[in-house]
Image: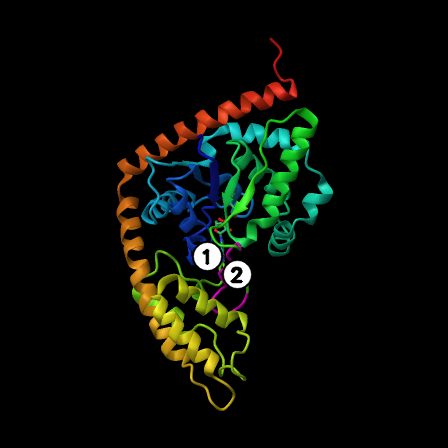
Amino acid sequence: MEKEIVLSGIRPTGFLHLGNYFGALRNYVRMQDAFNCYFFVADWHSLTTHPDTTELRNSVLRVIAENIACGLDPDKVALYIQSDVPEIAELYLYLNMLAYKGELEKTVTFKEKLRRQPDNANAGLLTYPVLQAADILIHRAVKVPVGKDQEQHLEMARNFAERFNYRYGNVLPLPHAFNYGDNLVKIMSLDGSGKMSKSENQLATLYLADDGDSIRKKIMKAKTDQGPSEPNGVKPDYIENLFTLMSLVSAPGTVQKFEDDFNASSAGNCIIRYGDMKKQLAEDMAAFIQPIREKAADIQNNKLLLDRIIRQGADKARASASETLKLVRSAIGIKYM
Ligand code: TYM
């Protein structure tokens, strides 16, 4: 049986963090044997918000290195850079004719980015979800491992594919956001203010390149409170986030102990010690990140290896992309001889 096709991408807009790992990369690694996988660095997308390209090359190479350090095998998957695959740009052009100004203006990420960069309301920002749909549809991928923040983009990709199929014939399968658990993941910033992100609030973000000391400092400063006011209470989201992080890197028995302490606590009888919990989390997190950080640094220094991986990735990605583009062109009727 043919393996299902999987695709996902990461923008090279800064250092990768735990949100990227647990929302995306961890699933990439788990999927690489059972699926036919395409993973890429979305350098074109980064130009919509980061027009200064001084750091671009470093960031692109680091994202490739970090993907491998997290466990991706570039001989099993196609690991490539978006701009190495011009076929994506052509599909983006066709899909732009099927995307409407009104729906693009309503996209949550567009509105957010506009708020952050009111002086750079460029058309690339508006059509960001169209380019993302082209990334996915160019390989006819059906599963897209992403974090919760990408859900709306996936819904839009399905809409564009459906419109294409309706107008020109059934060429593009409908892609869906994917996570091994029931829900897509959202890792919050350690200060409790929204999602962890590459370029904001760096002191409350845990990066895969952080050393043990910075990890400890950041976790010890994470937001907590005076403890639950009643037994088996509901956790505020910043406390829930610490438990989520702990369940990702600590032994199950450790998480259970703090869960039990939380549930047994009430006002005037606080059993859970957030200070102890953070100390334990910091140690387990430092131990988890260290090998990734070291491996990524080694790979990043090995330019020959990176060069080979990037060329090989581009070749695999272009082979698949040009097949799809042939079908797309012929479905549209762009085939004159
Ligand atoms: P990007 O670069 O912002 O993030 C890369 C991946 O990490 C996930 N992620 C998170 N997951 C959980 N908690 C968080 N705090 C968190 N922060 C980031 C994202 O959901 C994503 O899976 N538009 C995409 C890049 C892209 C793409 C694509 C993705 C371009 N084309 C095609 C999939 C398919 C983005 O900005 O991801």
Q: Can residue 74 be found in the magenta stretch?
A: no
Q: Is mark 1 within 8 Å of ligand 1?
A: yes
Label disc, if present, on residue 249 of the rendered structure: none
The residue closer to the viewer here, 118 or 176, is 176
The image shows residue 177 at horizontal and vertical percentages of: 54, 46
Residue labelled 2 has its Cβ within 8 Å of some atom of ligand 1: yes
Can you tell which quarter of the image residue 176 is in? Answer: top right
Q: Give the quadrant of the N terminus.
A: top left
Q: On the rendered structure, is 316 left or right of 145? A: left
| Residue identifier under label 2 | 195
Residue for badge 1: 19
Which residue ends up furthest to the front in the rendered image? 1
- Above or below, 323 against 79 in this view is above
The span picked out in magenta is: 183-193
Mark 2: which amino acid? Lys
Disc 1: CA contacts within 10 A as few (<14), some (14-19) or many (>=20) = many
Which amino acid lies under the numbered mark 1 shown in the image of this protein?
Gly
Q: How is the image coloured?
A: rainbow
Above or below residue 241? Residue 228 is below
Q: At which x and y percent is residue 302?
A: 26, 41
Please give the name of the residue rendered at 36% of the width and 78% of the height, measured from the top-left corner.
Answer: 276
Q: Is residue 166 left or right of residue 226?
A: right
Q: Can residue 109 be spotted in the picture?
A: yes
Q: CA distance from mark 2 to mark 1?
A: 8 Å
Direction from residue 191 to residue 59 in the image, left or right: left
Q: Are marks 2 and 1 in contact (CB under 8 Å)?
A: yes
Q: Nearer the viewer, residue 141 or 316?
A: 141
The C terminus: image quadrant:
top right
> Can you give x and y, in whole percent of width and height, for residue 149 in the image?
56, 53
Residue 192 magenta-drawn? yes
